[in-house]
């Protein structure tokens, strides 16, 4: 399979089975002001992610991919552009966009169970409902027996699994994941990727997944969005047509390696633009 | 045998100090009355525990320390938190707490005696003034350094501002508040004893000065032991409370 | 740029607040219901300028500073020195650990009557109480600083062939210095408190700012009391600034 055939510069639309748009981002732009100087972090990003799709965002380091996700989550204000979830424009942080961060944001003063229940309590779910949901999702991530432990008693991988349960428990419309496995060692990370694929296929949620790990992006995603360096635009959107469910060993397949190499090339093109020194690379 | 050896090695410094002290006593370099042996001090300490003088004076001192400290906490914590949340209040209060920190506020005590009298009022106010500084400063830095990702996840999970404050921000600041308490409380003890020593007609500091004037050094040292145990106990108590409620 | 702007704004706000406080005090002291024994700032400032014009305050300041500085320098010498040794050489650290846990919780001020009996109303007593009060914060901060040094610094220094002694003052001292300065600041504040207190307790004749307050208080001269308090406050503030200035010089590699 050649990569050229799956490459597309326009927003991907699945022709066979037209799906609802889960999250739509158009003309997103972000300019920071630092010491009176304006820095354009994101020049303009357009994305249309359909229901149930898993989309990864990769880019050269410092390209503003995390900033992009933080804007979608509403934690940072955007300079201009529109973000809408299921057709409705969104702004401030809200539980319709469940967010997972690179470092654990489990509250250290609450037990695992109470951490997962936190969002449900905040949204005033009925008591019985809370119990049921917490149990279901802690079992889903395989940590029900740790419900009475404090986060400090868990390993890094376990903490992130609890974070995933916490965010799934309050049933967001889309999931935003900001390098959630970035702080884990490579073996734990691989296990987590397998777990995430399983949980995602059960939950059927749309995901935007930011990572700097190319293999992780290819392994998990339906589409990989490659950003240019700052000021960021979408350089390329790659459709990953690997059969699901994907075995761990898929990483050894030629198709997988082709995707990986192609993205690697794209990122290195970006890195090298620096030495040539043009501002025009974004065009 | 091994256990004894281990004990001696571990507490070598203290054993040496005790031996040195007893050596001085046995050599009779100083009159016994001024330099009593450790055994005598201990004996006097036990005797002292049975006297009402000790307990009534200590009671007064404890009352002053606790009221001064509690006032400092009640006023100090909200100030620290508000400073961290509003840049206007930060601008307003920062000079007072930064520039005022190194000033020995206890020097104002003679004025407070004029304002509040020789009784507990002047002492409590001085204790309050000395305790509030570490509490405000610790709370402020603690509140400033609450991991913003905690706040973000709280928002993400749909918490109201009110809930965010009580359920995320305040617990996140709690460890620092306790750090402030642990700095402030010993200061409170020192200031209480100090102000009572300068001018008072009751309290443990007054009791010390009184005993000292009668040249009964063994009693003075026994009271010193008592105050030290009290200070130690107070710190343990605070630590216990912290470990109970700030267990993470 | 930004930080110097912030700094000057900070100073302006401080001065404005001080001025507001003084004028409020002045206004209040002109009303009837304000206690007459609290003098107005104008009077107090007058006394302070008189202090310096006649020079009568200088012997008091001199002797108070002498006691404070000797006490503080002893603390710096022994607290920091022993702290570094105890932190760097484990057996020494183990030797001192029980001393710290036994003597640190003692409110050292309680020892003042003990010292008064032993050494009388002398500078020995005062310097000793300053030393015992300020020693432990300095010692503990230094110890923590040295023990908290990243082991990799020490290993890499060893790897590059540094001797133990060289490591002490080329690696350990600079790496622990931020903590050591924290300890010094606490010690300095305690020094001033103890200087003031030891001069106020148990002395009826002599010199020193604390004595001056005591004496003026006895004669009901609250204006002099307030003036002397302000002089002590100013000295405490000034020496803290000096220490911070020194810190900025020595620790230039921090906050860059």
Image (cartoon, coloured by chain):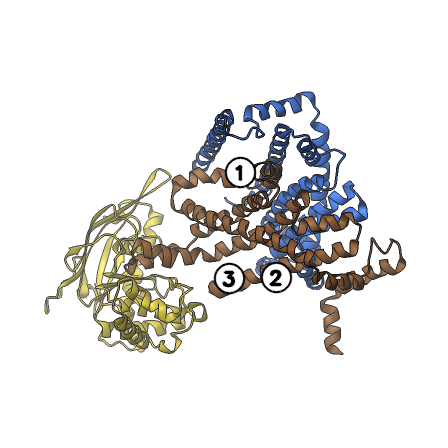
Label 3, label 1: how far apart the Cα atoms are: 30 Å
Residue highlighted by disc 1: B99
The answer to whether C203 appears left or right of A166 in the picture is right
The answer to whether A226 appears left or right of C23 in the picture is left
Q: Residues within 10 Å of mark 3 (few under 14, many from 20)?
A: some
Are both tags, 3 and 1, on one chain? Answer: yes
**Measured from the top left, where is residue B21 in percent x and y?**
81, 59
Choose between A94 and A230: the one closer to the eye.
Answer: A94
The answer to whether A131 appears left or right of C97 in the picture is left
Residue highlighted by disc 2: B233
Colour displayed for chain B in the image of the structure: brown
Query: In this rendering, which labeled residue sits more in front, label 3 or label 1?
Result: 3
Residue B242: assigned label: 3
**Measured from the top left, where is residue A235 in percent x and y?**
24, 55
For marks 1 and 2 on the same chain, the one whose residue lies earlier in the sequence: 1
For marks 3 and 1 on the same chain, the one whose residue lies earlier in the sequence: 1
Colour displayed for chain A in the image of the structure: yellow
The chain carrying label 1 is B
The chain carrying label 2 is B
Asked whether the viewer can see residue B164, the reply is yes
Q: Quarter of the image for the N terminus of chain A: give it.
A: bottom left
Label 1, label 2: how far apart the Cα atoms are: 33 Å
Dot 1: element = helix
């Amino acid at each position: 399979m050649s990569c050229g055939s799956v490459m597309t510069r326009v927003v991907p639309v699945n022709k066979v089975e037209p799906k609802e748009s889960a999250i739509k981002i158009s003309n997103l732009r972000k300019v920071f002001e630092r010491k009176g100087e304006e820095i354009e972090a994101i020049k303009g990003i357009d994305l249309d992610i359909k229901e149930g799709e898993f989309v990864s965002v990769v880019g050269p380091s410092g390209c503003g991919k995390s900033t992009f996700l933080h804007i979608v989550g509403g934690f940072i204000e955007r300079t201009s552009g529109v973000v809408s979830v299921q057709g409705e424009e969104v702004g401030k942080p809200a539980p319709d966009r469940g967010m997972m961060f690179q470092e654990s944001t489990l509250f250290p003063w609450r037990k695992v169970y109470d951490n997962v229940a936190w969002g449900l309590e905040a949204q005033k779910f009925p008591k019985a409902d809370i119990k049921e949901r917490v149990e279901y999702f802690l079992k889903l991530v395989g940590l029900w027996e740790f419900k009475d432990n404090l986060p400090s008693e868990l390993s890094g991988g376990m903490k992130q699994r609890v974070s995933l349960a916490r965010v799934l428990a309050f049933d967001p419309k889309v999931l935003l994941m900001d390098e959630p496995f970035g702080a884990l060692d490579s073996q734990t990370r691989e296990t987590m990727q397998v777990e995430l694929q399983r949980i995602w296929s059960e939950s059927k949620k749309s995901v935007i997944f930011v990572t700097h790990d190319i293999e992780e992006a290819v392994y998990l995603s339906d589409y990989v969005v490659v950003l240019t360096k700052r000021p960021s635009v979408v350089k390329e959107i790659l459709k990953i047509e690997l059969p699901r469910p994907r075995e761990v060993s898929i990483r050894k397949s030629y198709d997988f390696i082709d995707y990986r190499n192609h993205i690697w090339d794209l990122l290195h093109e970006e890195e090298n633009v620096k030495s040539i020194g043009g501002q025009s690379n974004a065009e | 045998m091994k256990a004894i050896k281990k004990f001696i090695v571990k507490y070598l410094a203290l054993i040496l100090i005790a031996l040195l002290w007893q050596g001085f006593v046995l050599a009779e370099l100083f009159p016994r009355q001024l330099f009593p042996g450790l055994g005598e001090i201990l004996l006097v300490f036990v005797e002292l525990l049975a006297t009402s003088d000790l307990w009534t004076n200590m009671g007064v001192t404890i009352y002053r320390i606790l009221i001064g400290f509690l006032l400092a906490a009640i006023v100090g914590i909200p100030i620290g938190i508000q400073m961290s949340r509003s840049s206007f209040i930060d601008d307003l209060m920062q000079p007072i707490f930064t520039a005022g920190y190194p000033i020995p506020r206890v020097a104002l005590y003679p004025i407070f005696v004029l304002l509040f009298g020789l009784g507990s009022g002047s002492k409590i106010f001085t204790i309050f003034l000395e305790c509030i500084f570490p509490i405000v400063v610790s709370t402020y830095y603690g509140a400033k350094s609450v991991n913003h990702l905690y706040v973000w996840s709280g928002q993400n999970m749909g918490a109201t501002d009110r809930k965010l404050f009580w359920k995320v921000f305040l617990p996140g600041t709690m460890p620092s508040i306790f750090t402030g308490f642990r700095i402030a409380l010993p200061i409170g003890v020192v200031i209480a004893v100090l102000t009572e020593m300068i001018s008072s007609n009751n309290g443990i500091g007054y009791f010390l000065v009184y005993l000292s004037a009668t040249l009964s050094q063994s009693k003075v040292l026994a009271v010193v032991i008592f105050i030290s145990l009290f200070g130690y106990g107070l710190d343990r108590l605070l630590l216990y409370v912290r470990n109970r409620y700030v267990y993470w | 740029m930004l930080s110097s702007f912030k700094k000057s704004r900070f100073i302006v706000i401080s001065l404005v607040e001080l001025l507001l406080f003084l004028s409020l005090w002045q206004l209040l002291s002109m009303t009837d219901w304000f206690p007459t024994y609290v003098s107005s700032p104008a009077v107090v400032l007058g006394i302070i300028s008189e202090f310096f014009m006649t020079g009568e305050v200088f012997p008091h300041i001199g002797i108070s500073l002498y006691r404070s500085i000797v006490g503080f320098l002893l603390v710096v010498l022994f607290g920091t020195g022993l702290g570094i040794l105890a932190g760097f050489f484990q057996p020494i650290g183990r030797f001192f650990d029980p001393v710290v846990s036994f003597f640190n919780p003692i409110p050292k001020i309680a020892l003042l009557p003990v010292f008064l009996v032993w050494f009388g109303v002398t500078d020995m007593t005062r310097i000793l109480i300053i030393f015992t009060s300020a020693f432990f914060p300095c010692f503990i901060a230094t110890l923590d600083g040295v023990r908290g040094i990243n082991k990799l610094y020490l290993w890499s220094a060893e790897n590059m062939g540094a001797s133990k002694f060289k490591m002490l003052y080329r690696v350990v001292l600079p790496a622990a210095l931020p903590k050591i300065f924290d300890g010094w600041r606490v010690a300095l504040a305690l020094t001033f408190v103890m200087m003031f207190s030891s001069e106020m307790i148990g002395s009826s004749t002599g010199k020193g700012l604390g004595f001056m307050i005591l004496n003026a208080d006895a004669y009901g001269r609250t204006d002099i009391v307030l003036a002397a308090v302000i002089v002590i406050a100013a000295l405490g503030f000034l020496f803290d600034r000096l220490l911070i200035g020194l810190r900025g010089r020595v620790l230039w590699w921090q906050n860059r």
